[in-house]
Image (spheres, rainbow, N blue to C red):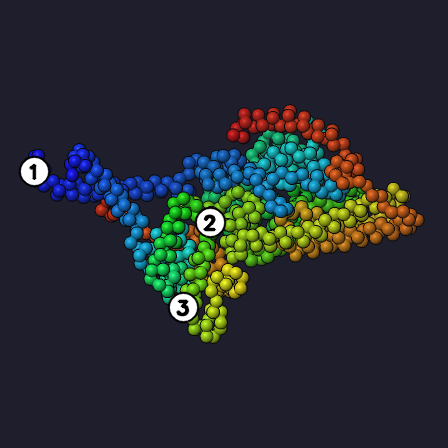
């Protein structure tokens, strides 16, 4: 043996060398075969881990099956982005723009209004805002259950349980222990095939009244309509507080105004001017549809939920946020400019439109204060009628353009048009006030209240903020934990 | 030799060398290294993230006349071409391995230069005799003194939409499984 080795030493070593190469190579092939088989696990739909049926409001359950979508949805909790004018951070808008307090005098928005945070905060934010008050009992409720409508996939679940009409009829706090999961999967998806489905009746009903069929829409349209379930102008109709979109005459600012005028509807009576006011909600969908991106066939999801590839798997990013946060995969998909340039185009639109907005807010406040001055000076209802009409129309337009946070980018020309009409009507209202004052023989200027801060403005319109805040604090520490505990006990919340 | 290299280490050393050479060969095999020496566009979809770009080229008017390299690699000089290709390739491999690829891929400045050179190279008569748009260099574009070809010809050849996720179901010649059919048969 030893002799054999000595004799063929070189050859044997070469054989050993060559043999090792072959063995390693084959092992490698085996390893890649293993890798390939493991990669098959990644095909999503065929590897559901849990069976979802009915209306499953608990987002975590869906997360088991669709981890990529779920994990990106979780990122709506992030509060780390601020562009020049917007972002996903907490911003007390009334603090920054105290004129708004006066514009909304007599309405809950004058108490508290902050910039919206991500979907994952929907329940927390609607519970914590001073606008929902501190209802320790059903009677103390400020708002109807309709206020929950857009906050949670528990809403369609409860609507299925108690009926749509009965849902809206209840008070807000009635469903405190039922509506606990923030806006999530079941709001937009059918669990059987994951198609986009419309879970909210208001949109389907509005389509029906316009003679359109929501079920007969393309996938691309649904990538917008899913958002239009909530990001639209709406109102609570009648004593049943039935959630309704005022689109019967059309979806422009004038069409909807005509609808409200015909219905004789007003959201509230202004505390200073006594004008029958309209509160625009957030007509994001309506304005987006009038802008250049929608006209070229884009959907909301194209920019707010851009496609993403993870390895070879394509999915939609469910981290809904300003597309400016990820210009490199939103704008750049179609536009060839640099990121910096694209950002500046957006800022240019926003800056120029917000310039007009700032003017409107100043003049509109003057008109309200002037109207109050005229009332205080003994003006009659008949004299004040044209003033109130103009105030309603001016503020409706201002609110329409401002409440839709993306308006100045979504539809810059339309938004600028709306705001310029608002400015025009604000001045017309002032002229009418001046006529009334002239007829009353008053020559002095309007009062000029100090509303330079949120606190001063709230004091001016007569809000008892310390009490409102203290009540809310108590509500948050007593009632809310009870709701959550009960929801956990009943496994409505995981 | 035994004086400087201990006898008992000869066998392990040779095995180790075999492992190294085997792994290198395996890497050559798995990465289809030799395909990169050719001009065959299917080499570019060895890595699947190029699939949307392969597909948009495949459906374009440039498909019958050009390969990827005709536009994306300098063609004036053999050495420069391969050096450029090696540099680009190593950069791509590094980024892909780190999983750092962006969702929307854009050429680097150097790459833009090569592309524009190649536009001008093929369309010389058109852009130097009929019009003068080809009498410029990309460096001038970079300095804002001239326009790049694609400032006007925006859809040439990859279309307006550019995104790794733009065509997940594109039919492109992705590499076959590295596992040989005889092994697959055996493992069934």
Looking at the picture, does residue A364 appear above or below residue A117?
below
Alpha carbon distance from label 3 to label 2: 30 Å
- Chain designation of label 1: A
Comparing A298 with A21, the one in front is A21
Image mark for residue B103: 2
Instruction: Mark 3 and mark 2 in contact? Answer it, CB < 8 Å.
Output: no
Q: Which element carries disc 1, helix, strand or loop?
A: helix
Instruction: Mark 1 and mark 3 in contact? Answer it, CB < 8 Å.
Output: no
Residue farthest to the left, as pictured: A3
Q: Are marks 3 and 2 on the same chain?
A: yes
Q: Are marks 2 and 1 on the same chain?
A: no
Residue farthest to the right, as pictured: A441
Image mark for residue B122: 3
Q: Where is residue A61 drawn, in percent x and y?
A: 48, 34
> Which residue does the image show at 72% across and 55% down from the upper left?
A420
Q: Residues within 10 Å of mark 1 (few under 14, many from 20)?
A: few
Q: Quadrant of the N terminus of chain B?
A: top left
Left or right of residue B123: residue A177: right
> Which residue does the image show at 38% across and 53% down from the upper left?
B87
Q: Which residue is mark 1?
A: A4
Q: Earlier in the sequence, mark 3 or mark 2?
A: 2
Q: Quadrant of residue A82?
A: top right
Image mark for residue A249: none
- Chain designation of label 3: B
Q: Where is residue A471 drawn, in percent x and y?
A: 70, 28
Does any portion of residue B4 appear in the rendered image? yes
Alpha carbon distance from label 2 to label 1: 62 Å
> Which residue does the image show at 34% across and 52% down from the upper left?
B46
Q: Which element carries disc 3, helix, strand or loop?
A: helix
Does any portion of residue A160 appear in the rendered image? no
């Amino acid at each position: 043996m030893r002799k054999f080795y000595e004799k063929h030493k070189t050859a044997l070593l070469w054989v050993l060398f060559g043999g090792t190469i072959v063995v390693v190579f084959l092992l490698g092939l085996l390893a890649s075969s293993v890798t390939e088989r493991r990669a098959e696990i990644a095909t999503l739909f065929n590897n559901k881990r849990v069976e979802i049926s009915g209306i499953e409001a608990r987002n975590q359950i869906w997360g088991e099956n669709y981890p990529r979508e779920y994990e990106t949805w979780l990122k709506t909790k992030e509060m780390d982005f601020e562009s020049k004018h917007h972002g996903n951070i907490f911003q007390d808008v009334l603090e920054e723009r105290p004129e708004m307090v006066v514009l909304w005098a007599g309405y809950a928005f004058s108490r508290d209004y902050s910039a919206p945070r991500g979907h994952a905060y929907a329940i927390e934010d609607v519970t914590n805002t001073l606008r929902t008050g501190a209802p320790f009992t059903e009677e103390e409720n400020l708002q109807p259950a309709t206020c929950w409508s857009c906050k949670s996939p528990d809403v369609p679940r409860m609507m299925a349980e108690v009926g749509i009409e009965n849902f809206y009829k209840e008070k807000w706090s009635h469903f405190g222990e039922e509506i606990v999961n923030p806006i999530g999967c079941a709001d937009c998806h059918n669990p059987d095939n994951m198609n986009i489905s419309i879970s909210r009746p208001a949109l389907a009903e509005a389509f029906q009244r316009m003679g359109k069929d929501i079920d007969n829409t393309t996938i691309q349209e649904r990538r917008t309509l899913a958002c239009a379930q909530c990001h639209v102008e709406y109102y609570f109709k009648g004593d049943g507080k039935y959630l309704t979109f005022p689109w019967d005459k059309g979806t422009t600012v004038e069409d909807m105004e005509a609808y409200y005028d015909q219905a004789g509807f007003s959201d509230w009576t202004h505390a200073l001017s006594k004008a029958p006011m309209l509160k625009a909600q957030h007509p994001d969908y309506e304005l987006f549809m009038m802008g250049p991106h929608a006209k070229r066939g884009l959907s909301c999801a194209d920019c707010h939920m851009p496609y993403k590839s993870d390895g070879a798997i394509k999915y939609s990013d469910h981290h809904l946020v300003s597309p400016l946060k990820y210009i490199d995969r939103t704008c750049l998909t179609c536009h060839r400019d640099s990121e910096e340039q694209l950002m500046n185009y957006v800022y240019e639109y926003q800056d120029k439109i917000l310039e007009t907005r700032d003017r409107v807010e100043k003049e509109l406040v003057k008109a309200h204060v002037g109207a109050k001055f005229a009332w205080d000076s003994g003006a009659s209802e008949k004299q004040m009628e044209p003033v109130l009409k103009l105030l309603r129309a001016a503020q409706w337009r201002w609110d329409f353009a401002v409440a839709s946070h993306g308006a100045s980018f979504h539809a810059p020309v339309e938004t600028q048009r709306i705001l310029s009409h608002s400015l025009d009507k604000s001045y017309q209202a002032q002229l009418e006030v001046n006529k009334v004052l002239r007829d009353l023989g008053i020559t002095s200027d309007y009062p000029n209240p100090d509303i330079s801060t949120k606190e001063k403005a709230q004091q001016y319109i007569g809000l008892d903020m310390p009490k409102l805040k203290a009540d809310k604090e108590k509500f948050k520490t007593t009632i809310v934990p009870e709701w959550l505990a009960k929801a956990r006990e009943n496994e409505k919340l995981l | 030799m035994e004086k400087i290299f201990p006898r008992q280490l000869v066998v392990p050393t040779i095995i180790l060398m075999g492992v190294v050479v085997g792994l290198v060969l395996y890497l050559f095999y798995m990465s289809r290294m030799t395909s990169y020496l050719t001009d065959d566009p299917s080499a570019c979809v060895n890595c699947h993230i190029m699939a949307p770009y392969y597909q948009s080229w495949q459906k374009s008017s440039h498909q019958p006349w050009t390969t990827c390299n005709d536009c994306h690699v300098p063609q004036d000089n053999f050495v420069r071409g391969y050096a450029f290709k090696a540099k680009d390739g190593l950069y791509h491999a590094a980024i892909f391995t780190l999983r750092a690829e962006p969702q929307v891929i854009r050429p680097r400045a150097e790459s833009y230069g090569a592309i524009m050179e190649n536009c001008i190279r093929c369309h010389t008569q058109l852009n130097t005799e009929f019009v003068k748009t080809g009498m410029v260099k990309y460096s001038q574009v970079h300095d804002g003194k001239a326009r790049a070809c694609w400032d006007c010809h925006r859809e040439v050849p990859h279309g307006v939409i550019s995104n790794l996720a733009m065509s997940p179901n594109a039919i492109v010649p992705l590499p076959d499984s590295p596992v040989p059919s005889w092994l697959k048969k055996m493992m069934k």
